[in-house]
Image (cartoon, rainbow, N blue to C red):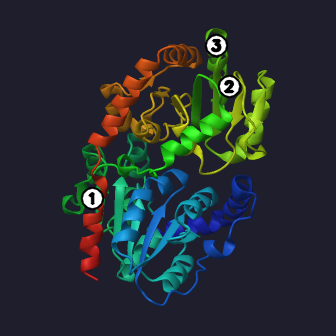
Amino acid sequence: MRFLYSLTLLLIMPFALAWLMWRSLRQTGHADKWGERFGSSPLLSNNQLIWVHGASVGEIRAAAPLIKAVHQRYPQHALLVTSFTAAGRNQAQALFGGRALIALLPYDLSFCVNRWLKCTRPILGIVMETEVWPNLFAACTRCGIPLLMVSARLSARALARYRRIRTLMLRALAQVTMIAAQTQGDADGFRQLGVAAERLQVSGNLKFDVQFPEKLMADGQALRAKLFPVDTVIVAGSTRENEEASVLQAYQALLQKQPDCVLVLAPRHPERAAAVAELVKATGFVCRRRSAGEATLKAGQVLVLDTLGELTRFYAAADVAFVGGSLVPMGGHNLLEPAALGLPVLAGPHLGNIADIAELLRAAGGLIMVSDAAALGQALLWLAGNPVTRRHIGQAGQQTVIANRGALAQTLALVEKQLARH
């Protein structure tokens, strides 16, 4: 099965190279780093490297508490953080560039991963959520490198997809020393794929252990005072294509009765910012782009957040957060970051990727789910006119985040156990 998998990768490689170059240019303005893709890395001689991998921006951000804790607890070890996407690499560089080496993950071909492992020689690999690379995992086993899969999740859709290649998946997952699942449902899914019970534990979701700089709220309020001299600031974060139009429609409805508002649109992929800005203008709004500077916005205007790594700061400046990928069938994005900051959180019905988190927040009263643009507009109008209600909803979500922390401690215990064996 792994041979057929590798053969398939080789056959599609020319198309994959073209696609990755195009995607990298869109995300970062630069071509893909082919050396890193084919396993190039500085030769690391101390053989004391801990490697952490996250697929893209979301996983890299979720790994932040773990990477910070590992860096503080094991200063004698070098850290390498990898991502599969160029945007993820840039996010890792912004978050961890001073404390870790940053690189793209090589292609999952034997000659690439063998070359990469020969150069990096990690003593432990930590994979965020559910990234499965059969050749890389097999090479790690041959080299005696233990692998941990942490904050692992397995949606019903992913489970159905993996069942179609169950033999390949089972053999790849057999190379993982321990899988720390987010929920019991996720653990049951891995068990259905054939993972032995002794290599599974439920440790929670590292995203609940999100940590913010002490000065974040002060920075957010300073940003608000500079950019948004209005009553209500709404941040729509991680929005996707065909979703911004609905948010703008809801904003239009809000302004008819609550005109002293400003909207910040933060597309999930910053390379879409130009298209989003054109949509904003076509809808009739005055549009500013964050990259153009820090000019003050007037009530009724829209700011397109086209810079990387600033969404959290804008959440800290906001009164209400809408989290995208949820009015369109994308499965939803990170609800916990705005909730942890005490914001009332709005989201659409498509939350399959984060169903457990969404249900926790909804049951606690910290999440308002809306079905469409009209419902979003009504919810925004209600929240804009009721600051006390906003505060109560935000506090409910914030307390839910605090109550569900603990995955970081359990993950660090797994790391310590593996390092003790080295």
Q: Quadrant of residue 76?
A: bottom left
Q: Nearer the viewer, residue 265 or 10?
A: 265
Disc on the earlier residue, 2 or 1: 2
Label 1 near label 2: C-beta < 8 Å? Answer: no
Residue 92: image x %, image y %? 55, 62
Judge from the rendering whether residue 117 lies leftward or rightward of residue 406; answer left or right: right
Q: CA separation, marks 3 and 1?
A: 45 Å
Q: Say if residue 283 shows up in the picture.
A: yes
Mark 3 and mark 2 residues within 8 Å of each other at the beta carbon: no
* Within-10-Å neighbours for mark 2: few <14, some 14–19, many 20+: some
For the C terminus, give its image quadrant: bottom left
Q: Quadrant of residue 285?
A: top right
Q: Nearer the viewer, residue 293 or 152?
A: 293
| Distance between mark 3 and mark 2 Cα atoms | 13 Å
Choose mark 3 or mark 2, whichever is in front: 3
Q: CA distance from mark 2 to mark 1?
A: 41 Å
Report the residue that reaches farthest toward the top.
257
Residue carrying label 1: 409
Query: Who's the residue at 52% across and 77% down the image?
Result: 113
For the point 76% across and 22% down, the residue is 283
Compared to residue 404, the image places residue 254 above or below, namely above
Amino acid type, label 1: Ala
Residue indicated by mark 2: 245
| Image quarter of residue 157 | top left
Q: Disc 3 marks which residue?
A: 253
Name the N-terminal-most of marks 3 and 2. Answer: 2
Residue 114 is situated, as x and y percent measured from the top left of the image, at 51, 81
The amino acid sitting under disc 3 is Ala
Q: Secondary structure at mark 2?
A: helix
SS at mark 3 in the image? helix
State the SS at label 1: helix
